[in-house]
Image: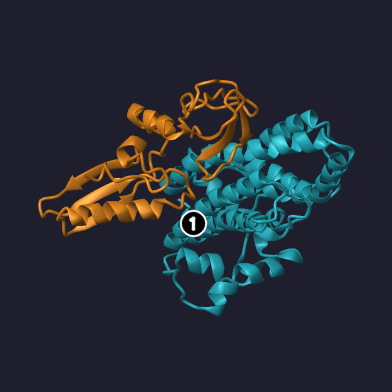
Chain colours: A orange, B cyan
Amino acid sequence: MAASVPDPEIPVLNLEDLGILRGVEVDADGCVLARLTPTYSGCPATQAIEQSVRNALVEAGFVNVRVEREMTPAWTTDWITDAGREKLRAFGIAPPVGAAAGKRALFEDVRVACPRCGSSDTACISEFGSTPCKAHYRCRACQEPFDYFKCL
Amino acid sequence: MADPKTLFTYVLRLADDHLINAQRLGEWCGHAPTLEEDLSLANIGLDLLGQARALYTYAGEVESEGRTEDELAFLRPEREYLNVLLVEQPNGDFAHTIARQLFYATYMLPFWEAMRASRDETLAAIAAKAAKEVTYHLRHASEWTIRLGDGTDESRQRMITALDDLVSYTGELFETDNVTDAIVDASIGCDPAMLREAWDATIAEVLARAKLEMPSAPWMQAGGRGGRHTEHFGHLLSELQYMQRTYPDMVW
C-alpha cells in the first residue's frame, strides 16, 4: 500500500519503482513505521511523499502511523526497478544509464538513447533540467527534447 | 570523541558554507544568461540548500539548546556565521560565478568523499549523498570554465579577471585550527590541508583545458571561520533574514 504511493513529480512511478521505500513494520500494538530514503538532499518532493505515505496508511485504517527518514545507506538510482525504468521510458524520460556505483571521470560522456525514437544520436543541453534529478537532452534524429534521469 | 561545542562549531561552519553559497546561486534565478543556466544554477543551489538543512538540523541536535534549523539558518547575527569568505563573494558577471563555483566544488568533492569514512554516522550519511551531487556541480563549473576560457576574447578576458579576483579567497578552504585538529583527532572529519593536492590537480587540469593560467596569490584572505566577514556579507544577510525577522515565528 505504501509501495504504491505515486511520486508527485513523476506520477507513473510509485515508491517501490523508485526504491525509496526502505521498509514498513507493524508492531504488536498495531503501530506502523514506514521508513523512506530521500533521493536528492534538496528534493522538494520528499516532504510531500512522506505526507502521502502517512495519508495512505491512515486511510487504510492504521491509527498510529510514523514515517521516518533513513539516510543510510544513501539512495542510488541503482535501486530503481526494471519496471520503473520501463515506466520512465514510456513516460518520455530516459532512464539512468549504467550503474551509479562506479565513479565517473570528470569529463566522461554518457550515451543516452531517445525515449521516443530510440536513437543514440542525442545531445546533452544541460546537466540540470526541470528537477535536480533530471538533465535536459535533445534528440538529433527525431528533433524532440527529453529529460534524462541522471545516475546518482 | 570531540566535545559537543567543537563538533557544533565544525558542523555549523559546513552548514553556513552551503547556505550562503545557495543564497548567492538563488540570486541568479530569473536573471541567468540562458534559461538552461537559470535552471542549472537554481538546481545546484537547491542541492546545497538540502545539504545545508541536514547540517543545520544536526548542528541543532549537537548543540542541544533546542535551536531549530530555521533559527540557526536565519536568526544569527553576522559575527556568528562561520562560512568561508569565498562563498559570500557576489555573483558579479557569469564568469565570476563560475570561477567561484569551480574553486568551491573542486574542494567539496574530495571533502565529501573523505567524509564518507567519518566516525560520525550522521556526517557520513550526509557525505554519501552530497559527494554524488557535488560530482555534477563540479562538472558544471568545469565545463563552463572551459567554454569561457577557450571561448571568445571577451569570455576569456572575463574569466581571467574572475580568477584573479577570487584566487585570494581559496586559501581559507585549507585553513586548520584547534577545531579542525580536534575533529581530525576524533576521526570525525578530514584534515583540510590534505585536500590541497587533489584540489591543485583538478584545478590545473580544468584550467589547462580552458587555456587559462592559475593566477598567483601573494597572500590569502581569511577571517570567515572566525565570523569576520567581507563588506558584502551584511547586505546578503539583510535579504536572507528579512522574512524571519519581519515575521517572527512565521511558518509556511
Instruction: Please rate how many residues cluster around mark 1, counting C-alpha atoms within 10 Å: few if below 14, some from 14 to 19, many from 20.
Output: many
The quarter of the rendered structure image containing the C terminus of chain B is: bottom left
Which image quadrant is residue A71 in? top left
Residue B162 appears in view: yes
**Residue A141 left/right relative to A92:** right
The tally of labels here is 1
Q: Which of the 4 image quarters holds residue A83?
A: top left
Can you name the residue that lies furthest to the front here?
A142
Task: Residue at 77%, 49% (x, y): give it.
Answer: B96
Q: Position of residue A54 (x, y in %)?
A: 26, 55
- Amino acid type, mark 1: Arg
Q: Nearer the viewer, residue A82 or B112?
A: A82
* Position of residue B242 measured from the top left corner of the image (x, y, whole percent): 60, 73
Left or right relative to B224: residue A13: left
At a point 26% along the width and 48% down the height, the residue shown is A34
Protein chain holding label 1: B
Residue A141 image point, x, y percent: 59, 23
Vertical position of residue B244 compared to residue A115: above or below: below
User: On the rendered structure, is A36 left or right of B75?
Assistant: left
Mark 1 lies on a secondary structure that is helix
Question: Which one is nearer the viewer's eye here, B25 or B228?
Answer: B25
Res B118 visible: no
Residue placed under numbered mark 1 in the picture: B53
